[in-house]
Image (cartoon, rainbow, N blue to C red):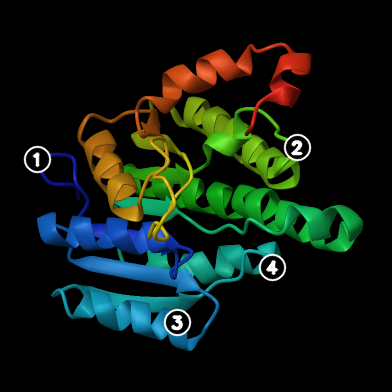
Amino acid sequence: MKDAFGLPQSLLVLGGTSGIALATARRLIARRTRTVWLAGRPSPALDQAAESLRALGADVRTVAFDALDPESHETALGKVFAEGDIDLVLLAFGIHGDQAHDERDPVRAVRVAQTNYTGAVSAGLVSARALQTQGHGSLVVLSSVAGERARRADFIYGSSKAGLDSFAQGLGDALYGTGVHVMVVRPGTVRTTVPAGRRRDPLATTPEAVASAVEAGLRRRAETVWVPGTLRLVMAALRHAPRPLFRRLPL
């Protein structure tokens, strides 16, 4: 069960090697979280992620999970929920792809869509049903500001995130009043480092900043979180910009 501040004691991460997810797990472990499940494709990276969290004092377990194999999701995630209640499911998997290459290779473009949207629909519904059965819990979905309006530079990725964002909002409405809380997180560009000589993007963010925003959102049971918060106003303007103007913007 969550503590008095609304923070989880148990966490399931879908996308167990995600930098944002691991930053969030570290932050929550420093608060109250004691049990962490990392779901992802078996790999040295997944094992290393688990070890890094164990070093912080958490009971960390891994489970094989493949976003591109939705038929396996119910079995894989069922194993986790069979071990006990989960207070928070963090849906953090996704790929950006390579826009230029993916435009020329529809199969690669479809893989982006299947991972970011189709896989998330399956995993999100399986998780939501399990949370509803136990009668409590939160589902946090990592969306992206890229889903707010398609840009020439990354419209394949952006369209997949737009679908995910819309799905998560609808799922949240469907679960309203059931005891299950859905929160959509919309980060801007997430960077771990800024190369020397390059100007820092004032609207870029870091995994640690997203983790902090997730924690704050959980405390107040927010439905939508922007990171940084100023992106809400920026995107409100861009969303309504005429297309001829939008095409000329350096985005």
Disc 2 residue crowd, few under 14, some 14–19, many 20+, Cα 10 Å: few
Label 1 vs label 2, nearer the camera: 2
Q: CA distance from mark 4 to mark 2?
A: 30 Å
Q: Residue 185: where, in percent of width, then height?
A: 43, 38
Label located before the other in sequence (4 or 2): 4
Q: Residues within 10 Å of mark 4 (few under 14, many from 20)?
A: some
Q: Which residue is mark 1?
A: 4
Taking the image as shown, residue 32 lies to the left or right of residue 189, namely: left
Name the residue: 33% across, 51% down. 88
Residue at 59 percent of width and 64 percent of height = 73
Residue closest to the eye, 139 or 86: 139
Disc 3 residue crowd, few under 14, some 14–19, many 20+, Cα 10 Å: few
- Quick check: marks 3 and 4 in contact, CB under 8 Å? no
Contact between labelled residues 2 and 3, with CB atoms less than 8 Å apart = no
The amino acid on which the numbered mark 2 sits, given as a three-letter code, is Arg
In this image, 172 relative to 7: left or right?
right
Whether tag 1 and tag 2 are in contact, CB under 8 A, the answer is no
Query: Farthest bottom residue?
Result: 44
Q: In this view of the protein, which residue sits in the foreground, 42 or 97? A: 97
Disc 3 designates what residue? 45
How far from the left and from the top, in percent, is residue 49?
35, 77
Q: Quadrant of the C terminus?
A: top right
Q: Are marks 4 and 2 in contact (CB under 8 Å)?
A: no
Going from N to C along the chain, the mark reached first, 1 or 4, is: 1
Q: Give the CA separation, mark 1 to mark 2.
A: 45 Å
Q: In 3D space, how far apart are the residues under numbered discs 3 and 4 (Cα atoms)?
A: 20 Å
Which comes before the other along the chain, label 3 or label 4? 3
Residue highlighted by disc 4: 69
